[in-house]
Amino acid sequence: MLKFIRSLYFGKRLFYALFGISLLFLISFWFEPLYSITWIITSVLGVLVFTDVVTLYSRSLISADRILPEKFSNSDENIVEISILNKHVFKVYAEIIDEIPVQFQKRDFLKSLKLPAHKKNRFNYLLKPLKRGEYIFGNLNIYISTFLKLAKRRYIFNKDQMVKVYPSFIQMKKLDFMALDQKIDLHGIKRIRRIGHTMEFEQIKEYVRGDDVRTINWKATAKNNHLMVNQFQDERSQPVYSIIDCGRMMKMPFEGLSLLDYAINSSLAFSNVALKKKDKVGMLSFSNKIDNLQKASSKLSQLNRLMEALYNVNTGFFDSDFSLLYSRLKKQITHRSLLMLYTNFEHMSALQRQLPYLKAIAKNHLLVVIFFENTEMTKLTHLTPVNVSESAHQTIAEQFVHNKLLMSKELQRHGIQTLLTPPKDLSINAINKYLEIKARGLL
């Protein structure tokens, strides 16, 4: 009985009808013949409500399912599918209220549908998570009514359904496709002109116009009686690490995502491209301690390991210990490697404190320091000030932007590769930098 009461709801039409009947009873106080007619209308309404309730509760003839992907991609639109089957012999009307995870703060979800008899209906909606972690969906509530719409029956499905939000694998696949496309320059990934070549031999082939004459193989030419050239390829199986700073400076948000999430999404996309180039990829995260170290590997399963490791990386409010990073790299990564260090500096003094450790790391490895433009400050510098206060704010903003450029030049002066980028362009620019280093044979 309690279950029946909790699932029974009444529609707006019933309340409108009761309001009208109340008015009729009020009018019948002055017009007495209307009193009997109003009771007849009330009786008819009672019969219709009873019939509507019996029709809805005669059998459970509605089934529904919330179909979630295996995992959500952070900062991307993810599809959630709702499937509803009407087993009634007549058309019904459905109102769907899905209890979306609290992280989205979306409390107005409502979808109305007409469900034909013995038909299945499907519809999709999109969700864009901005944090990694576990997301719990509540009840999938389906409110069913007949054409009378006097009563509703609530069905509940898929209670407490969980999905994990991982770093942006959708962005990873997109950039993987773009990196391999012949027209990658149309999508924002630069073509790097190759100066010379690396020394990993691939094959001997016939000379065609445009080949470097310095690569002519004279022995093979004499043997075949026509020009033959040596063909080289990018050196493979080079160790490449994504090093992610999880300190308090990476907590800064831009367009809904923290700098840490931008770095994690970028490192995943970059690692995928590096694996396609047959390099070994690994990762390390640190703040006041070393949180995670994945040794570089070129196995196909390495990308899944990195994704699982990055899924649990979080930032706190600690200052990052670069001296600890240097000592751990010296012990754990003994071969010369490409280190893509995702961090952020807002003041020159902050960089100067860490510069001795960065220089020490760069002695043994090819270090690329990736830090972020403050896009809000950049926008402020392009505004036209209308008063003295705004002019002062703009001057300060220009100083911050200039300091970022000075930090980049200071790192380059000490032989450290740098990448200063807006957060939203991080993945593309990081891949560009990697392709440039491969093309120039710096590692």
Image: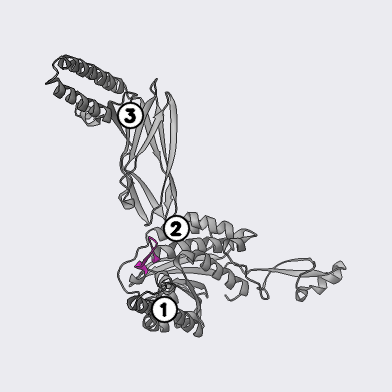
Q: Tag 2's secondary structure?
A: helix
The amino acid type of the residue labelled 2 equals Met
Q: Which circle marks residue 398 in the picture? A: 1
Q: Which residue is mark 2?
A: 307
Measured Cα–Cα span from mark 1 to mark 2: 38 Å
Q: Residue at x 35, y 63 (%)?
A: 314
**Which of 14 and 168 lies nearest the eye of the viewer?**
14
N-term mark: 3 or 2: 3
User: Which residue corresponds to the image point at 45% horizontal and 57% vertical from the top-left?
Assistant: 168
Q: Residues within 10 Å of mark 2 (few under 14, many from 20)?
A: some
Task: Give me the C-alpha separation between circle 1 and circle 3.
Answer: 60 Å
Q: Which residues are magenta?
A: 250-259
Magenta segment includes 185: no
**Image quadrant in which the N terminus is located:** top left
Tell me where residue 92 appears, x and y as whole percent.
37, 26
Q: Which-is-in-front pick, marks 1 and 2? A: 1
Quadrant in the rendering for residue 188: bottom right
Q: Is 28 positioned to the left or the right of 315 in the image?
A: left
Front position among marks 1 and 3: 1
Query: Is 27 or 203 nearer to us in this picture?
Result: 27
State the residue position of label 3: 144
For the residue pair 191 and 10, the one nearer the viewer reads as 10
Task: Name the disc covering residue 369, or none.
Answer: none
Query: Nearest the camera: 324 or 20?
Result: 20
Image quadrant in which the C terminus is located = bottom right
Q: Quadrant of residue 31?
A: top left
